[in-house]
Image (cartoon, rainbow, N blue to C red):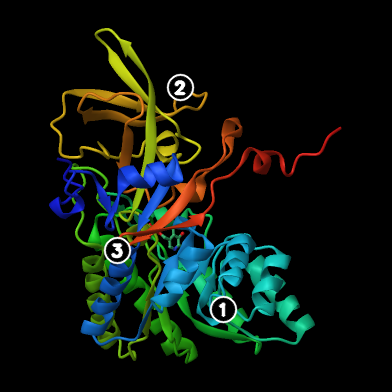
Amino acid sequence: MSEQLSQHQMNDQGHLLIDGADAVSLAQEFGTPLVAYDVSAIRDQIRRFKSVFEENAIAYEVSYASKAFASIAMYQLVAQEGGHIDVVSGGELYTAMKADFPMQNVSFHGNNKSASELEMAVDQQIGVVILDNFHEIELLTKILASKNAEINVMLRVTPGISAHTHEYDQTGQEDSKFGFDINSGQAKKALEQVLANPRMKMLGVHAHIGSQIFEVNGFVMAANKLVDTVADWHDELGYEPEVINVGGGFGIRYTAEDDPIAPEAFVDAIVKAVKARAAERNLKTPAMWIEPGRSIVGPAGYSLYTIGSRKDVPGIQSYVAVDGGMGDNIRPALYQADYEAVLAAQPLAEPEETVRIAGKYCESGDILIRNQPLPKTKPGDVLAILDTGAYGYAMASNYNRNPRPAVVFVEKGDAKLVVARESLDDLVRLDRKL
Ligand SMILES: Cc1ncc(COP(=O)(O)O)c(C=O)c1O
């Protein structure tokens, strides 16, 4: 059995269950390729993050990084859980508006927000614009003046620490397209500009040091650096920070090779570090915000495919092809991401061979899993790739003019279509004849 699955995820027929719904039936009812989310898993993870802050008695917000998977239903779900969201485009902001998401709980990120995106943010009176560069300060200054408006801002800073999956370094992050560099004094200059503008309320600082991180030390170092930075600003300029936002990036387990601590354990370590450092620096502990994306939706998502053709290259490799691929999950092709898969009808069956799971796209690199042990498969079997909920559908494309899959939310056995499958007409909707 895949270590990614637990015993309670099977029904009497031995089929894979996704929050109480039979994965084989979901594939029959909604068709494949299909992305199915276990809604209880999403809710539980948000709640686990919240309890860490509550146990540590610190003011907080859990802001879902919606780039991991954005849809109207997803924003509604986060709103139900009392979470914040961060958006990185006018498109995500618009989707949140369509979900009636409370705009005061929205943070807006991005290294090149356009004037129209910033206008939208100001018109919607969103919670906070996370300023990324001097050009944006200038743009926002003009927009606020022309609209006679005010807005909360934070400064995204680069603390000089970058974390990779299993390691971190202390200099790399300065060479980043995002944010104001602390060490060279850019961040302080940005702070002075913001403090001089009565239309901007400076809430605090933000840093995001990377994604799919397994190493807690990088986060702790970054958090300490953020506290030191605001403490210096407090000492030098009398600035009172309200929020320290440490971003997201908490690593998840995709395969048996991955062994991260639980996402909330990262947060616990960071919170304790922030509290301790703030006390050392005689700073009133600011509220802490986090922006997890992957850890909230990644493990909750399943990609269901129907197996079609097979190619055996004698003595070399067997390819088992499915009806989706890089168009609905580009991560393996883009950065060699690994996943595990099971047959939805017999997830516990002993593997009989190791095969390569190929997509249907016209690219040799369209391989979803390079080495997947499986029982013998036949055309028509439903394959479930596990833990595909983050940055899968979110990065989906219409490459080869394939329609993007449908998305369903399953909660305690009830499945609801939340993103319809694209139709062939959808594919030509924007085309114009000569
Ligand atoms: C600013 C910011 N916050 C949060 C996230 C979410 O990261 P993750 O999905 O790894 O938690 C990202 C991801 O790139 C990000 O750029």
Disc 3 versus disc 2: nearer the observer: 3
Report whether 227 appears left or right of 7: right
Secondary structure at numbered mark 2: loop
Task: Give the mark, 1 or 3, whose residue is nearer the N terminus.
Answer: 1
Q: For the residue marked with disc 1, what is the amino acid? A: Met
Q: Which mark is residue 412?
A: 3
Q: Quadrant of the C terminus?
A: top right
Report whether 95 appears left or right of 209: right
Q: Position of residue 215 (x, y in %)?
A: 24, 56
Crowd band around label 3 with a 10 angstrom C-alpha radius: few (<14), some (14–19), many (20+)? few
Q: For the residue marked with disc 3, what is the amino acid? A: Lys
Q: For the residue marked with disc 2, what is the amino acid? A: Ser
* Quadrant of the image occupied by residue 123: bottom right
Along the line of sight, the residue nearer the viewer: 21 or 179: 21
Q: CA distance from mark 1 to mark 3?
A: 29 Å
Along the line of sight, the residue nearer the viewer: 88 or 157: 88
Question: Contact, CB < 8 Å: mark 1 with mark 2?
Answer: no
In this rendering, does residue 89 appear at all? yes
Secondary structure at numbered mark 3: loop
Q: CA distance from mark 3 to mark 2?
A: 39 Å
Kindly identify which residue carries mark 2.
364
Which residue is found at the position 47% from the left and 27% from the top? 360
Question: Contact, CB < 8 Å: mark 3 with mark 2?
Answer: no
Q: Position of residue 192 (x, y in %)?
A: 58, 81
Kindly identify which residue carries mark 1.
103
Which residue is found at the position 68% from the left and 72% from the top? 120
